[in-house]
Each structure stands twice: as C-alpha cells, then as structure tokens.
Image: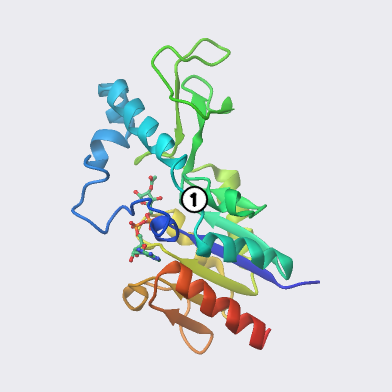
Amino acid sequence: MSKRILVFSGAGVSAESGVKTFRDYDGLWENHRIEDVATPEAWNRNQKLVLDFYNQRRRQLNEVFPNEAHIAIAELEKNYQVDVVTQNVDDLHERAGSTKVVHLHGELKKARSTRDKSLIYNWEEDLNAGDKCELGSQLRPHIVWFGEALNQDFLLSAKNAAEQADICIIVGTSLLVFPAAEIPFYIQQNCKLFVIDPNANELNLPIKGKNVYLIPKKASEGMKEVVEWLRENE
Ligand code: OAD
C-alpha cells in the first residue's frame, strides 16, 4: 500500500493564482469588512450585498488558474494516497487534478437552499434574489459563514485522514480559524510534517521535533522542495 498524505491548505495556496488571502492586508476582504459579507447577520441585513460579493468571487474564479503548488499537490496522487482538506472555497485543487478534496468552508460554485441545507446545487453563474430551491426558498451561497457550524461529516472524515496520515503538508494557512485549524492536530507524533508558508516560523504547529520541516516560502517553491524531499527520502 502506498503511504498516505494529508494536505491541509488555506488561502495562501491560491495566492499565486491571484486569489487574495484573508489576513495579509488591512483587515478587509476585497474591500469589505468580513462581518458585512460573511455572516448570517449580513445575509439577513442585506442579501443583495452578500449575493453580489460572492458573485464577484465566483466570477473571479473564471479568471484564475491553478498554480504550480496546486499542480504539484495533484501530482502526489501518482505515488501516494492523498487527501486534500482545504479551507478554500475556490475550485483550484480540483482543476489542478486532485480527486479527493474536502471543502471545510463550502464552495463558491455551489448554492444551497435557505430552508433545507441538504439541498445543494452546482452553480456556475451569478446567484440572484429570486433564485429558488425546489421547495421555493431563496438560494444562498454554499459557504460556511462566521458563526455557522461546519459540516460534521466533513470534519470527521478530515480528522480520520489526519489520524491516518504518514505525511502531512500544511500549506498557506494562518491556522487561526477554528474548528478547521484543529484538523492537523489529529496527526500522529511519527507523521512527517511539512509546513509551507512565508510565516511558517510563527505558526502554532501540531507537533514539534525532528519530523517537522518548516519551509518559509511561497506555496509553489515550497511544494517543489517537498516533492524533491519525498523523491529522495520516501
Ligand atoms: P489566512 O489569510 O488567515 O492565512 C493565509 C496564510 O497564507 C498566511 O499564513 C500567509 O502567510 C500565507 N501566505 C500568503 N501568501 C502565500 C503564498 N504565496 N504561499 C503560501 N502561503 C502564503 O487564510 P486561511 O488560513 O485560509 O473562512 O483562513 C482561514 C479561514 O478564515 C478562511 O477559510 C476563511 C477566513 O475567514 C471562511 O471564509 C469561512
């Protein structure tokens, strides 16, 4: 059996594709305060603003492409069993070719019913007021907003993937948003951990010691180093 790799990714893996990270700038996310666009209160207050915001994010996806880091992650599947657990709502891991991707925080290219959260639809176009589910209720972006619970099945399968991982690659995440950031804390002590992030030295990591390789670089360069290390050592 080939070894198992958990890739735990955040906004930084998509930065080189031109998708902005959340905490690197001025506290604003594409010129909006998070509480104005990414909370249930924002949705109740101003549906149009929230719909427009996510419509822009969805449109942006058509203008960006997977970068070398996404591609290197997808290519790991040639030699390993790979689980990608991402906090990202873009589809760049899938477009690069990764086949097992769990989106802890939802997906831009999906919409869901405001009446029954199990009614989820693929959604490529703008989502507008008046777009309804089969029960006749307004559709909303399929995004986990601040203050909302994560999908428990996804959390469980992500924790299992972490527990079983021989190798874990944390890439492009500040590890500040819980419960998502808990996931890598389920890896075993003997798991090899690679952490790729320009701020890698400042992050709060799940394990310490000789099995940890900090790579304080951008995702694409960092993934090259990991691939090389795996080629030489595994
Ligand atoms: P953050 O913006 O908190 O962190 C991005 C991380 O990427 C930082 O640690 C940066 O140092 C790093 N970074 C920046 N450029 C990079 C590059 N080129 N290569 C590699 N790393 C780079 O983003 P997340 O950790 O993903 O939630 O944020 C977690 C969650 O908070 C998001 O999923 C989102 C947000 O609010 C929701 O939308 C629910």
Residue wearing tag 1: 65
What quarter of the picture does the C terminus occupy?
Answer: bottom right
From this viewpoint, which residue is outermost toward the front? 63
- At horizontal 60% and vertical 49% (from top left) the residue drawn is 94
Residue 23 x, y percent position in the rendering: 27, 56
Foreground: 108 or 105? 108
Q: Where on the picture, by quarter, is residue 74?
A: bottom right
Q: Amino acid at mark 1?
A: Phe
- At horizontal 66% and vertical 63% (from top left) the residue drawn is 82
Q: Which quarter holds ligand 1?
A: bottom left
Residue 229 is at least partly visible in this image: yes
Relative horizontal placement of residue 31, taking residue 206 as reference (left or right): left
What quarter of the picture does the N terminus occupy?
Answer: bottom right
Instruction: Count all numbered tags in the image, as a single digit.
Output: 1
Foreground: 61 or 216? 61
- At horizontal 32% and vertical 32% (from top left) the residue drawn is 53
From this viewpoint, which residue is outermost toward the right? 1
Residue 185 x, y percent position in the rendering: 49, 67
Residue 116 x, y percent position in the rendering: 53, 22
Relative horizontal placement of residue 18, taking residue 230 as reference (left or right): left
- At horizontal 56% and vertical 64% (from top left) the residue drawn is 7
From this viewpoint, which residue is outermost toward the left? 26
